[in-house]
């Protein structure tokens, strides 16, 4: 059983190691494995990177995010500015052009809609928008087009879990129904749970992943 102090120190080290995080004004508190991140960062991308860094640490059971995005005082970015930058993305980004992804901006938060073939394309579109200055959040409502049978999806996910050296695949159960994958079972750390999620999303035709894996 890891102490809260050990978990906190490892999270701070992981945040310091993460190259996408430039801010040093991130605080971490831990109580019984539940982590709260607070402080300020310079972009939404940094905020997401900090959350993911915390989730990678062994012993973390939950993450509460209380980080604020603070832009330099001399920088003022309107929704119109963000929309214009996204319009530029639509001109040169292969994913935005190929799949006709749409974006709506309100108070700095961007909502993405459209449909793609793979989860990595959905994530890539979100990440491209998250890089933009002025963005305070991204709601990713891009859908994934189903194009595989449930049995085929289940086999591909189970095979991927078996190949992973970090996951005890026998402790994870995979159910697939109409492109929706439900994961159940137990793992020892949050990062193992994330690996199982990634394995599920890597299968073609997966439109949704419900992660009910417990950390024990």
Image (cartoon, helix red, strand yellow):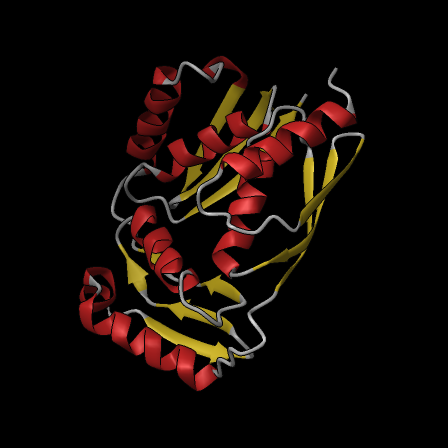
Image location of residue 181, percent across then percent down: 45, 39
Res 86 → quadrant: bottom left
Res 52 → quadrant: top right
The residue at the point 47 percent across, 82 percent down is 79
Q: Is residue 162 left or right of residue 211?
A: left
Front residue (pair 134, 206): 134
Q: Quadrant of the C terminus?
A: top right
Q: Is residue 197 left or right of residue 1?
A: left
Image location of residue 125, percent across then percent down: 33, 59
Front residue (pair 39, 150): 39
Q: Is residue 31 left or right of residue 214?
A: right
Image location of residue 202, percent across then percent down: 33, 37
- Residue 211 appears in the picture as rendered: no
Front residue (pair 150, 193): 193
The residue at the point 28 percent across, 41 percent down is 204
Q: Residue furthest right?
A: 31
Q: Quadrant of the N terminus?
A: top right
The residue at the point 41 percent across, 35 percent down is 198
The residue at the point 56 percent across, 39 percent down is 15
Q: Residue furthest front?
A: 74
The number of numbered discs placed on residues in the rendered structure image is 0
Measured along the vertical axis of the image, is residue 92 above or below residue 41? below
Measured along the vertical axis of the image, is residue 3 above or below residue 14? above
Image location of residue 137, percent across then percent down: 53, 65
């Amino acid at each position: 059983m890891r102490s809260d102090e050990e978990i906190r120190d490892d999270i701070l080290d992981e945040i310091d190691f993460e190259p996408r995080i430039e801010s040093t004004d991130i605080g971490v508190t831990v109580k019984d494995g539940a982590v709260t991140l607070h402080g300020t960062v310079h972009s939404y991308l940094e905020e997401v990177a900090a959350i993911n860094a915390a989730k990678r640490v062994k012993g973390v059971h939950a993450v509460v995010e209380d980080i604020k995005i603070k832009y330099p005082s001399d920088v003022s970015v309107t929704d119109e500015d963000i929309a214009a930058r996204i319009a530029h993305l639509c001109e040169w980004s292969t994913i935005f052009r190929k799949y006709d992804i749409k974006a709506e901006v309100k108070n700095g938060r961007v909502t993405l809609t459209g449909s793609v073939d793979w989860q990595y394309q959905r994530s890539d579109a979100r990440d491209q928008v998250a890089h933009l200055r002025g963005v305070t959040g991204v709601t990713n409502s891009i859908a994934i087009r189903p194009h595989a049978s449930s049995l085929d999806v289940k086999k591909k996910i189970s095979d991927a879990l078996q190949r992973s050296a970090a996951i005890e695949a026998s402790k994870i159960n995979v159910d697939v129904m109409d492109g929706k994958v439900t994961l159940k079972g137990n793992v020892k750390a949050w990062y193992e749970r994330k690996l199982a999620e990634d394995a599920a999303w890597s299968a073609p035709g997966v439109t949704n992943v419900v992660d009910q894996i417990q950390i024990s």
